[in-house]
Image (tube, coloured by chain):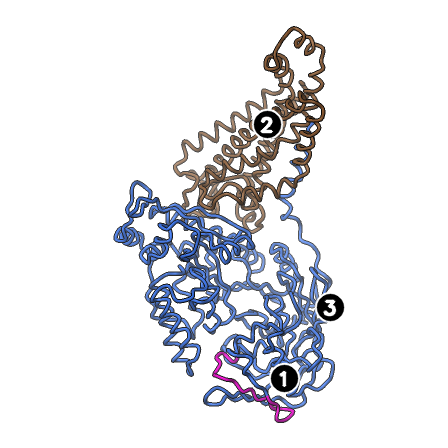
Amino acid sequence: MKKRVPAALLLLLLVTSLGVLWLAPDNYAFQDRDATMAPASVRHWTGTDELGRDRTVRVAAALLIGLTGAAAAAAVTTLIAASFGLLAAFSPAWAAALLLFLGDVFLSLPWLFLLMIARSMLPLTASPLETAIATFLVLAALGWPACARAIYRDASVLRSAEWMIQGRASGLRTGQLIRLHLVPHLRPLLMPQFFICVPAFIVAEANLGALGLGVGEPMPSWGAMLLELDNSALLARSPWVYLPIVLLVVVLLLVESFATEGEANA
Amino acid sequence: MPSLLRSSILPAILFVLLPIAAPGQAAPRLPGELAWAIHSDPKTFDPAKVDDQASELVRYLTGGVLLRMNRQTLEAEPQLAESFRVSPQGTLLEFKLRSGLRFSDGSPLTSSDVAWSIRRILAPSTESIVAAEFLSPAAVSIETPDKLTVRIHLPKRIIGLAEIFDQIAVEPANRPTEARVTSGSFTVSDYKRGQYVRLNRNPNYWRHDKAGAQLPYATGIRLDIQNNREQEIALFLRGEYDLIDNLPPDYFRVVAQKSPQSVHDLGASLGTEQMWFNQAPGAPLPEFEKAWFQNRSFRVAVSEAIHRADLARIAFDGHATPGTGFISPANKIWHNDHLQYPHENLPGAIQLLASAGFHRFGNQLWDSSGHAVKFSLLINAGNPARQKMATMIQQDLGAAGMQVTIVALDYPALIERLLHKQDYEACLLGLAVVQPDPSFGMNIWLSSGENHQWNPSQKTPATPWEAEIDKLMLAQGSAASVPERKTAFDRVQQIVADQQPFIYLVYPNALQAVSPKLRGVQASIVSPGPVWAIDFMRRDPGQGGAR
């Protein structure tokens, strides 16, 4: 299967990032103030940023934070979407219409501004880790309606499938129906949903970070690192400034490939 | 399939990368015209109603004034007035106008125009910010014994005459024109919102150079409204702009590499960057936090734990001067040269905290009632130098056991917290100082002032040292001589250094880029910076026209 290549690459990236964090002499927040914007060296493999922090360590940490955060958020959002879609599919028509209307209202909201508002309501003293968790939770809470609609449509087709009718006729309870018949059939739909959400959330976090509303300093994040690209003065000083964006694109492409494979298999 | 989420990815990436777009086009330059960028639309062209930077620049370039402050010597120079005198008590000012003055439309300029313009400034309905400088504007009376004499009777002495009259543009009496008809170097000829302001030379300007040639030399000025610094720099390097005032420190190196002879670091500016703790008793903070912030030892320890030289070197790429107090050393007249201030001293800071009842357990500092010392530091989003300073302070204070979280807010949200809700713990901001005279800071230093940020608008001074500052500031405001004012003001600087209500971090350097083709520029760190001698500025005709 073609899926193995991106999976292996992604795994390699994750293991390398973990290895970097494990082996590097400095942590991601340490400012080596005598070596700011240093070029690549034995100590700093890809040089340092403007505050003398090791770029390799920061990129590795950002990759892990971004990917795990986005994956967790995507799992939560897929779960919410699946519950919502199933609930609508198995409710009476008027309730389904109401639920779908609710989802549409959610869809039509300006999500970037909502994210900004929700994120800025956090207490000021929230630690960087808490801001990271909050950021991804907010993403998860706002990301589900599009998935929910797709799941509703497929689930309502399934509801009237002949084998479902037969299951019901042979006395299976709703819980059993869902577990034995529905979930196995929905999985090919849920997996791509999940893999589509991951890159979307990575990018959304990067956007928030670029607006100063993402993960707090000194914790590294894609958004804060991409902000460096906004400064031509920095671009001229070190080619390693491009490292985060290159890695981000690679990660996005790898994760996206899962989604498309999933769709093809579905 | 679920295309909505997918389709949101591409716009999202574009959103992040959009600001890197290629430089745009500037409007074509007219012959003999100077051009540079301002960073926002002027809010008004009415010289009496100016209260923002862009409007102030337009007023400076178009408004004829009785006195102008020389931006290098800081002394008053007569302009429309040929001479002036102040009575010994300081309550009578008499200006003698030059003869034959005319407005840009050719109509004569007489003492009645001057009196009308000053009365307009003083009238409450104008809401001019200059009126407050006259202390009690309603009690000021103006007479015009003849066409060339203006007498101003004041209820009591006012200070900083050059700065005050520098801001009062003389307009044609009873027909204000929003700078279309002026008595200064230029007139406003065209304005396209969000694009540019175009100024034309005033053909009837009173001033001539030594050879008798009509000033200003430049035929006009185009001020492009441009808030993208990347584009501004690209257009400057292409020769479309003649100068950049307040070049951001991280771009200094870029411009210097491409055009080394055009960049100038004039040393410390008058502005300051400072952090402070919220000491307001009514703030919605826990009592133990207020107790830290109101504790002098705590503030001094924080001040001692910060590596200011690192801030200047790294956050400003070397283009800043470590801060000691609120008067920059560039302000030679008013800076207290004998100031005693907290020096960088981490062991000393840790000791001071211990003596104030704080103790360390592991890497964390705790107060005597068992609360971990943690606080947030607010900054405004979108200021890279401040962001870097905050992150460095986070590490510096971490070494003393304090946990600092940095919160970047947009300006409206920041102001809301600072001024209205007072819901913050610490804040890092800068103050752009436009006038060297300390009288500008009344609203900051008086305990009743709205900008007395650590504890604003107090009914009575909360501490004895704030009471002493009140007394000294009022005393210097009514003192007759500069040395007397200086003595009082030196003491204010010392109290602030002792108490550290504001912890001064750095004085950003004044960074300017001036095209090598531009002649007649006289450098200055006082607003409006390099263009203060605008009358003598022109592009070198020997090197061709615009591009």
- Residue B152 falls within the magenta-colored stretch: yes
Mark 2 residue element: helix
* Image quadrant containing the N terminus of chain A: top right
Quick one: label 1 or label 3, which is nearer the N terminus? 1
**Residue furthest to the left:** B355
Q: A120 or A236, which lies in front?
A: A120
Whole-percent x, y for residue A210 in the image: 56, 44
Find residue A80 and name its label: 2
Categorize mark 1 by other alpha carbons within 10 Å: few (<14), some (14-19), many (20+): many
Residue type (three-letter) at the residue carrying disc 2: Ile
Q: Which of the 4 quarters of the picture holds residue B457?
A: bottom left
Mark 1 residue element: helix
**Disc 1 chain ID:** B
Mark 1–mark 2 Cα distance, whole angstroms, equals: 73 Å
Which residue is identified by label 1? Answer: B114
> Do discs 3 and 2 share a chain?
no
Mark 1–mark 3 Cα distance, whole angstroms, equals: 26 Å
Whole-percent x, y for residue A265 in the image: 67, 18
Would you place residue B307 above or below residue B58 in this image?
above
Query: What is the display colour for chain B?
Result: blue
Mark 3 residue element: strand
